[in-house]
Image (spheres, rainbow, N blue to C red):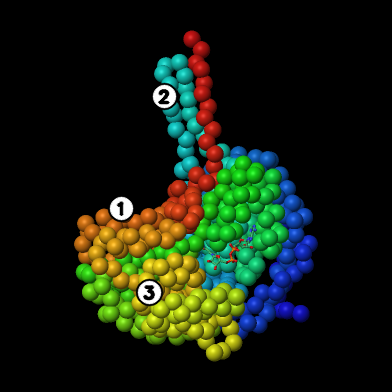
Amino acid sequence: MTELYHRNYIDGAWVDGGAGRLAVDDPATGEVFAEQAVADAADVDRAVASARACADSGVLAAMRPVERGRMVRKMGDYLLERVDEIAVLLTREAGKPLWESRIEVEGAARYFEYYGNQAETVEGRSIPLGANYLDFTVYEPFGVSAQIIPWNYPLEMTARSMSAALATGNACVVKTPELDPLTNAYLAEAAEAVGLPKGAVNILCGHGREAGAALASHPGVNQIVFTGSVATGVAIASAAAKNVVPCVLELGGKSAAIVHRDADLDTVLSSVRWGIYFNAGQVCSAMSRLLVHQDRRDEVTEAVAEIAKGLSVGPGVERTEFGPNMAAMVSEKQRDRAEAMCAEAQREGAVAAAGGRKLNRPGWFLEPTVFSGVSPDMTIAKEEVFGPVLSVLSFRDDEEAIRIANGTDYGLVGGVFTEDVDRAMRTAQQMRAGQIFVNEWYAGGVETPFGGYGKSGYGREKGREALWNYVQTKNVAIALRK
Ligand code: NAD
């Protein structure tokens, strides 16, 4: 028996799963400490029916938006009031340092604040058709929003979609990740605490191929948001297409930072620390490639290798404050996959300037890693590792830098480090990515739209752009009688 068992939240009640239970381990030790109910297709049916009934009742859509917005904002307050407790559970299930878990809980709360505030700003427009007509548009919620969540930010990713969906008057069915589903329970509690109607929020965990697939293909779903791998994204988009419903895909990346000859070294190093070692590199918008002007290559490579070597790696619960530290990866499988990619990189000729191996201790730890001598054709330069692994490449001129940066199938984010504003702007124009950082990786916030070019997906989450994922436009044209 484990100390903790979490049920699914369907139709306003905590229920066991039709597919039994799954074990949740602590990535710092590998030991199982909790169990989670596993939904089957029948559970998904019940959750969608509940959300459908809520949406069809019109209760959310009919509310004055400011009232709905206040409820959404209060869900964020609910999380903040429990930040310490949630952060501990998040660290236990996902492995991340405790200070990072706090950032994630605060980030989740921030989504509820931001989209709660936006609820009453979703205004239509009036379209002039001449004196004989009055024409206007209104935005209506799709109805039932299905959200399939990845394990790298389990709480924040649910908050991101759920807050915007609720603010615009949709009911939600969330499929949480198998590896770290536990903290999502706080969102169901929050929905209850703020008085959202039954069915507005349903949260269930289940296996991707069963519950995930059942949700993505469910005829009662009107709109889908997915974050995760390209292969699963393709399956979800195909299921959505069969039901003719829209979906937003936020997939992976192999994002590049271009370091020009005039770049400030400390600025670059601070961005490397966050860009590739935050959440042990398990971030879709991680800075996984550093493209350095050939004149600065050795100096920058040495300095980033020092950062990697200077990080203390160990259990997340012991890492309570921001500093030179990193914790476990989410699972043995992800860690071993990343380590295998490091071995492959070395076979292809890359040199490990730091790390490259797993830690010789229990738990799913990988050394913070830097590869030098990477060329654009190597696997490590093209495929997403989803771990704390930085590849350093070099370039001769601006044109080559852009060509290498744009030379993968992905296009999620990109960065440029230079003191020359013209060069920065030209680079921003030429990089094929949904978000460009100038002199600070991860600059931006909940307010700034986020999403990919190419195989990184389509649609945008965050910012005002994301609101339009959850509403459809209705035009009303009125012929005026003489
Ligand atoms: P995944 O895409 O398989 O899983 C993400 C979510 O989709 C999970 O909730 C999973 O249960 C669900 N899912 C899986 N198969 C499904 C299906 N057929 N239909 C519906 N839902 C399904 O990702 P993963 O296996 O957890 O990780 C594999 C790789 O994905 C990682 O190595 C990484 O490259 C990438 N990834 C990216 C992100 C991101 O933020 N972009 C997040 C997590 C993983």
**Separation (CA) of disc 2 from disc 1:** 35 Å
Image position of 127 with respect to 401: above or below: above
Which element is circle 2 on?
A: loop
Image marks 2 and 3: residues in contact by CB distance under 8 Å: no
Instruction: Characterize the local packing of mark 2: few (<14), some (14-19) or many (20 or more) Cα atoms within 10 angstroms.
Output: few
> Which residue is identified by label 2?
128
Instruction: Characterize the local packing of mark 1: few (<14), some (14-19) or many (20 or more) Cα atoms within 10 angstroms.
Output: few
Q: Mark 2 vs mark 1: which is more N-terminal?
A: 2
Amino acid type indicated by mark 3? Val
The label shown at residue 429 is 1
Q: Determine the quadrant in which ligand 1 lies.
A: bottom right
- Which is in the foreground here, disc 3 or disc 1? 3
Q: Residue at 62% of width from left, 70% of height from top?
A: 180
- Which is in the foreground here, disc 2 or disc 3? 3
Amino acid type indicated by mark 2? Pro
Q: Is residue 139 visible?
A: yes
Amino acid type indicated by mark 1? Gln
> Which residue is identified by label 3?
374
Viewer-nearest residue: 122 or 459: 459
Q: Residue at 25% of width from left, 62% of height from top?
A: 398
Q: Residue at 34% of width from left, 66% of height from top?
A: 257
Which element is circle 3 on?
A: loop
Outermost bottom residue: 360
Locate residue 275: give its quadrant. Answer: bottom left
Horizontally, is 154 left or right of 24 in the view?
left
Viewer-nearest residue: 206 or 339: 339
Q: Quadrant of the N terminus?
A: bottom right
Image marks 2 and 1: residues in contact by CB distance under 8 Å: no
Q: Please state the horizontal and vertical placement of residue 476, each as a whole percent of the image.
A: 53, 27
**Separation (CA) of disc 2 from disc 3:** 58 Å
Q: Please state the horizontal and vertical placement of residue 396, each as a whole percent of the image.
A: 25, 67
Q: Please state the horizontal and vertical placement of residue 198, each as a whole percent of the image.
A: 69, 51
